[in-house]
Amino acid sequence: MPNGAERLLEVLAAHDVEVVFGLPGVHNLAIWEALEKHKGIRMIGVRHEQTAVYAADGYARATGRLGVAVVTTGPGAANTLGATGEAWASGSPVLVIATDIPSTLRQPGVYRGVLHETRDQKAMFLPVTKAAFDVPAAHELGACTDKAVHAATQSPHGPVYLGVPTDFLSAEAPHHTPAKIVRDHLVPDLADAERLIARARRPLIWAGGGAARSGAGAAVGALADKLSAPIITTYGARGLTDSPYVVKGPVHAPPVGKLWDEADLVIAIGTDLDGMMTQNWLQPKPPALLAINIDKADADKNYPADVTVEGDAAAVTEALAAKVSAKDSVVDVDAVNAEVRALVEADSPEAAKLLRALEGETATIVADMCIPGYWIGGFHHVTKPRGLAYPVGWGTLGFGFPAAIGAALDGRTIAVVGDGGFLFACGDLATLRQEGLPLTIVLVDDGGYGMLRYDQQVADHAISGVDLARPDFAKLAESFGIPAVALDGFDGLKEALANADGPAMIVVNASLKPPVNTSPRWYRKNAT
Ligand SMILES: Cc1ncc(C[n+]2csc(CCOP(=O)(O)OP(=O)(O)O)c2C)c(N)n1
Ligand SMILES: [Mg+2]
């Protein structure tokens, strides 16, 4: 009979998993042995466990599929927590499989000093996962893996922890027939929603990550068409639809924010209207709010909804678009977009050059929590669904490069990172080289933690701890066998991107001012 490790892979393969990201340890080695037999699954060996989960997350965001990470017990599992938290806050379908100490050596509640032992490894993951499971017995390994995959991939998506005592991987494990994942397309009664829309003269559509994950782009475009309603996309929904009603800028830019203020109905689709988008809820409560969300609690936790439609964003929006009557156009979206472009040019000509270099880019872009990343998150017009991954969920610096490794499994990818965040996972240049992935790193070197330097300036603090010694990044990349060029400013960036093929790094020496979508520049202020 196959062992636990083989059963684990069998269940993953039955759920169409083709790639996993991992780092071996003595406890999980049976999985590498099983991979030798199971040629259908590709293991991308990474250089730190944070990368295993970031890459799984980047893969999940780029493809919409399950991202899987395999790590070892104790410190290996703990090393994934920042990345797991980012996947959790961004609702990414990620499965973190970590081994645990042998079940035979465990004394519940007692730390005995077994190699890699943690008193309660699963407990570390509870606050940063949608669900966490410990496999209770070897014969339940298949069923438990199946349950974990279901939890991660069933809406609302999220990361799931699966803890496997190491001895179960080599024990006999009976066959388990995985259950098919079925998506719930049921559309509830829409009468209340229709009434709310019928009354509105100036509706606004606000689409979030849930809309993107359910593939609601066409439906959202159709609804906007019908209602002549502008569409504001959150960071998690950039590129959702190519509808001409999409506003090409963040709601933190006053001409876009005005659309919210002047709307008499906001139709919020697959979004929780979070603090990062709404300037910590300083956007006023809209006169009417219609929320469409698979998770009712998520739908109106931040702004009370007049009507909540609980269901799949794509299915509900499509049905609604078919039912509502057409409305006349009240908002000139092209004029708003022109205003936004002018604002960027006036605010930061250098940032405008960065954005121009990326205009029309068809590669997937993965941005880090760096100033160029904030500009891209706010102002880059993304040309395809899932075309931008950005760690706004948890604000996780160090996401950009390792998540891009996962995204690059799906095709050409550009990681935009700063000199500070890149060093979090620079060892994974070795992974990039080893796997030969189509990933170009655009590293903007401003001599340190530029965003924090700005925070210190506006707070009138001393400039301290933010100017950093850096390596010669181009030489660093070249030492891994990755070709690199260095530019002064963004002028040559478009050409350098066009010339980059396979693993590559472009170092840009430049310093940008943070954009209006970063919190120190939010324009809405508390009345106090
Ligand atoms: C895990 C984590 N640690 C620290 C921070 C705080 N932080 C946000 S931006 C930033 C500076 C990033 O520097 P760099 O990558 O060079 O980008 P820059 O701001 O210079 O463009 C820091 C330290 C964070 N968001 N996440
Ligand atoms: Mg920097």
Image (cartoon, rainbow, N blue to C red):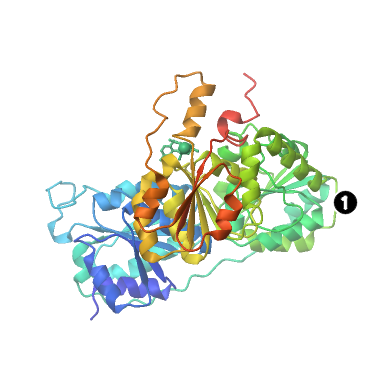
Indicate the quadrant where residue 319 lies.
bottom right
Q: Residue at x 59, y 42 (%)?
A: 375
**Disc 1: which residue:** 328
Left of 455 or right of it: where is 190?
right
Q: Position of residue 320 (x, y in %)?
A: 73, 59
List x then y, in percent, for residue 342.
Answer: 74, 38
Quadrant for residue 137, please give it: bottom left
Q: How many numbered marks have been drawn onto this rendered protein structure?
A: 1
Q: Quadrant of the image for the N terminus?
A: bottom left
Residue closer to the observer: 28 or 416: 416
Side (left or right) of 244 relative to 167: right
- Decide which of 483, 308 is in the foreground and name it: 483
Residue drawn where x is 60% and y is 40% of the image: 277
The residue most toward the right is 328
> Label 1 amino acid?
Asp
Is the residue marked 1 within 8 Å of ligand 1, measured from its CB?
no
On screen, 353 above or below 327?
above
198 versus 288 height, above or below:
below
Horizontally, is 118 left or right of 204 in the view?
left
For the residue labelled by badge 1, is the local secondary structure a helix, a strand or a loop? loop
493 left or right of 181 in image: right
Q: Residue at x 29, y 48 (%)?
A: 78
**Would residue 380 be visible to someone looking at this image?**
no
- Classed neighbour count for the residue bearing mark 1: other residues with Cα under 10 Å, few (<14), some (14–19), many (≥20): few
